[in-house]
Image: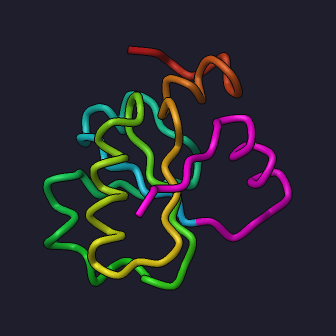
Amino acid sequence: MTIKQISAVALQERLANDEMLFLLDVREPSEFEYAHIAGSTLIPLSLIPLRLKELDPEQEIIVICHHGVRSQQAARYLQDQGFKNIVNLNGGVAAWASDCDLSMPRY
């Protein structure tokens, strides 16, 4: 099953429209502290299986990482666990920093 993708600009538009999205950041705590999208929740990729019960399998979840690779892995895992509405942020926070928030630190 294919993982849905969303661009940083499309995500920004949806957030501006106050859509109820759960932003799941799967990077490491130090990366998250350095730069993250406002309103996102940090659960590092390695901890997703342990913290699965904190996530609503019916809610739309946008999965975020640095460039979109770890988030793709997390999205696949969540989908395999029965989550129905998982979307990967294509390009991750790097795309967000270059396309949506030029003040966001880059690494």
Residue 10 is one of the magenta-drawn residues = yes
Residue 2 is one of the magenta-drawn residues = yes
Quadrant (top left, top right, bottom left, bottom right) of the C terminus: top left
Residue at horizontal 29 percent and vertical 41 percent from the top = 70
Residue at horizontal 81 percent and vertical 46 percent from the top = 13
Looking at the picture, how far across and down is residue 16, in whole percent?
82, 51
Quadrant (top left, top right, bottom left, bottom right) of the N terminus: bottom left
Looking at the picture, how far across and down is residue 9, in whole percent?
73, 35
Residue at horizontal 28 percent and vertical 72 percent from the top = 80
Instruction: Report the span colored magenta.
Output: 1-21
Q: Quadrant of residue 69?
A: top left
Looking at the picture, how far across and down is residue 99, in whole percent?
69, 22
Looking at the picture, how far across and down is residue 35, in whole percent?
45, 30
100 left or right of 94?
right
93 left or right of 79?
right
Q: Quadrant of residue 10?
A: top right
Q: Is residue 24 above or below residue 20?
A: above
Nearer-the-camera pick, 1 or 104: 1
